[in-house]
């Protein structure tokens, strides 16, 4: 592969003028059996490059484990991009934002007392060095200087929105170089943050989604020479629970892209294909109020969540054709979908009756997820109350949503999002068991709230007196093997798993619609599709075809509240991402 270089105010590739026309797609948000399809559609839209982040927290879920296989096989993804004739912009972090859990920073960092994230704190830098030592050897052979597809590598991510410590950026750039990254390095920041987030001697790029002339002018004012590039050209946006589904008209987005390209800039569309934050991997924002992001990362992108071209795909293809060669031929057809069907969930078992999901740990005060060595999921806390009578429960801090039970009976819900930390109820007897089930709804991924430990954080008071002597049961739900399902006709109190089976002749994509269910998670054949919540806007979950198999398939729901009378789910050919206006 040719090598990208800077020549005056432009790029060259193998000595020839080159404009980067790229689109973002995150391999970790796409089923690996669908990578090749998404990359092919990127090329057919006219892109010559794709961009991806690298999620440190998935690749290194604990200090002594590192994964580069299955859905995290980054080398295979890069090889597939090369086979499609696409270049790659690689953004390995360590921080990535991306509306991703913790901005990609692994939760075990928070177990270090006093650690300062995204800084030169020794514990943080030691962890970053360990991450790069494991990741970069798999990447170096795929750099353009070795004949691979990776044209350029980003240093950190939008650092100017967080801090202005240039020495930290210099350290990270030097670390990349020490590990053999010898291609072009670059930074990206929003225009107002360029002075804080840029690294002298390294190409600065800007992030924006409109007013391209203004954004590029700010970049040129900061960087008088060099190529102009928008690394995140926001062509859509993400959704949060309780909000509306954000869309951007294709015609308007195409006009903005046309203006950007007419000014001679290079571009990376954010996103070309958003995909899905499967499992527990969605992030959250906290700007005075905590706001978790939904499971779908459709982003109103040119390829929708199922990888089908949208009107935006067609509009962007037409714009790109004015400035660069676009492959001939029709727009790719939508992928096959399962025929609509209803699946009855006939089996059930209570969450609190499923003892094999995690061993309990005793402590005087409640332990956070990080103290328990846990990244995602839930923690079940229990303690014995000294006496009956009227009670006021106070949580010093809650991260993020607590369901409260007395002797197994639900008495209320508290939510960090609504600043709810107290609950009044009557204790029926001396020695009643208080259970608090806490859900990690997603660690904050942007801004100063990144240090976001989960669970019951701090003291728990009852009528002003601290409760001590706790049982802490981690419930990461990485595997549901061993659930002891029974006939689901008997009523269950509290959170419960509901299971069913369905047959498939030929696997294909579908969307699981969850009308009547309140809040929880869905697994199909052990693959964790993500969270659902009747709060919306999202009311269906994307089920990739490769998760299914010919013959019998299994679906499991964890419903955190009461199951509906009609315990069924519906497979449909289209999603329900919610209303587009509040």
Image: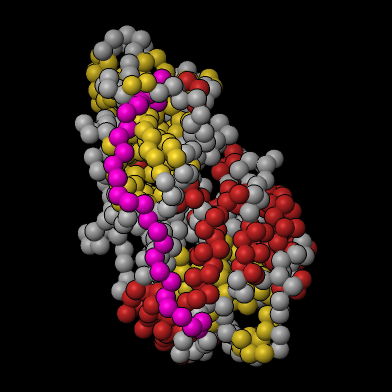
The N terminus lies in quadrant: bottom right
259, above or below 286, in the image: below
Instruction: Tell me which colouring the rendered structure shows.
Output: secondary structure
Q: Residue furthest top?
A: 430
Q: Residue at x 36, y 70 (%)?
A: 310
Q: Quadrant of residue 54?
A: bottom right
Residue 572 at least partly seen: yes
Residue 382 percent location from the top left of the image: 42, 21
Q: Position of residue 35 (x, y in %)?
A: 54, 60
Residue farthest front in this picture:
505
Residue 435, percent across and down?
Answer: 38, 22
**Over which residues does the magenta segment extend?**
326-353
Q: Residue at x 35, y 41 (%)?
A: 416
> Which residue is found at the position 32% from the left and 71% from the top?
248
- Characterize the magenta stretch by its predominant secondary structure: loop
Residue 523 visible within the image: no
Q: Is residue 258 left or right of residue 242?
A: right
Q: Is residue 359 above or below residue 62?
A: above
Q: Nearer the viewer, residue 6 or 398?
A: 6
Please give left or right for residue 269 compared with residue 252 in the image.
right
Decide which of 360, 314 is in the foreground and name it. 314
Tell me if residue 569 comes above or below residue 6 in the rendering. Answer: above
Residue 5 percent location from the top left of the image? 69, 82
Taking 579 as reference, is 296 left or right?
right
The residue located at (43%, 27%) in the rendering is 380
């Amino acid at each position: 592969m040719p090598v990208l270089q800077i020549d005056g105010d432009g790029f060259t590739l193998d000595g020839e003028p080159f404009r980067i026309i790229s689109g973002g797609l995150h391999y970790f948000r796409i089923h690996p059996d669908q990578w090749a399809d998404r990359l092919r559609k990127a090329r057919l839209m006219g892109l010559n490059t794709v961009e991806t982040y690298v999620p440190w927290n998935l690749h290194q879920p604990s200090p002594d484990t590192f994964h580069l296989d299955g859905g995290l096989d980054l080398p295979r993804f890069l090889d597939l991009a090369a086979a499609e004739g696409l270049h790659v912009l690689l953004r390995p972090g360590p921080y990535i934002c991306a509306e991703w859990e913790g901005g990609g920073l692994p939760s075990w960092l928070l177990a270090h007392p006093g650690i300062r994230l995204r800084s030169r704190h020794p514990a943080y830098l030691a962890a970053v060095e360990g991450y790069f030592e494991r990741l970069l050897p798999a990447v170096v052979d795929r750099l353009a200087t070795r004949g691979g597809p990776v044209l350029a590598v980003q240093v950190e991510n939008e650092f100017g929105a967080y801090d202005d410590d240039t020495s930290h950026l210099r350290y990270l750039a030097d670390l990349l170089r020490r590990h053999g990254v010898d291609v072009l390095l670059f930074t990206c920041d929003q225009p107002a943050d360029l002075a804080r987030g840029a690294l002298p001697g390294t190409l600065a790029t800007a992030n924006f989604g409109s007013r391209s002339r203004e954004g590029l002018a700010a970049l040129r004012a900061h960087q008088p020479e060099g190529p102009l590039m928008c690394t995140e050209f926001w062509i859509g946006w993400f959704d949060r629970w309780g909000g509306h589904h954000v869309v951007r008209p294709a015609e308007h987005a195409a006009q903005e892209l046309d203006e950007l390209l007419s000014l001679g800039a290079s571009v990376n569309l954010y996103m070309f294909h958003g995909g899905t934050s499967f499992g527990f991997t969605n992030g959250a924002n906290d700007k005075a109020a905590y706001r978790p992001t939904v499971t779908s990362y459709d982003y109103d992108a040119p390829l929708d969540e199922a990888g089908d071209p949208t009107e935006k795909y067609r509009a962007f293809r037409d714009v790109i054709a004015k400035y660069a060669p676009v492959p001939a031929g029709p727009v790719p057809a939508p992928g096959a979908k399962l025929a609509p069907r209803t699946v009855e969930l006939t089996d059930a078992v209570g969450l609190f009756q499923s003892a094999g999901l995690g061993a309990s740990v005793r402590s005087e005060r409640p332990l956070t997820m990080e103290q328990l060595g846990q990244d995602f999921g839930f923690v079940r806390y229990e303690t014995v109350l000294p006496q009956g009578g009227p009670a006021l429960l106070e949580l010093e801090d809650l991260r993020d949503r607590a369901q409260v039970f007395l002797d197994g009976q639900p008495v209320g819900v508290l939510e960090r999002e609504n600043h709810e930390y107290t609950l009044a109820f009557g204790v029926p007897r001396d020695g009643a068991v208080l259970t608090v089930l806490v859900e990690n709804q997603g660690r904050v991924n942007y801004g100063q709230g990144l240090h976001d430990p989960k669970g019951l954080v701090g003291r728990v008071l009852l009528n002003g007196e601290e409760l001590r002597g706790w049982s802490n049961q981690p419930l990461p739900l990485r595997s549901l093997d061993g659930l002891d399902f029974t006939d689901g006709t008997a009523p269950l109190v509290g959170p419960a798993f509901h299971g069913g089976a369905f047959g498939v002749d030929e696997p294909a994509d579908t969307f699981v619609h969850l009308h009547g269910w309140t809040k929880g998670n869905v697994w199909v054949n052990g693959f964790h599709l993500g969270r659902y919540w009747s709060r919306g806007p999202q009311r269906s979950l994307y089920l990739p075809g490769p998760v299914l198999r010919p013959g019998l398939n299994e679906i499991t729901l964890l419903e955190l509240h009461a199951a509906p009378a009609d315990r069924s789910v519906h497979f449909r050919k289209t999603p329900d991402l919610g209303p587009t206006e509040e």
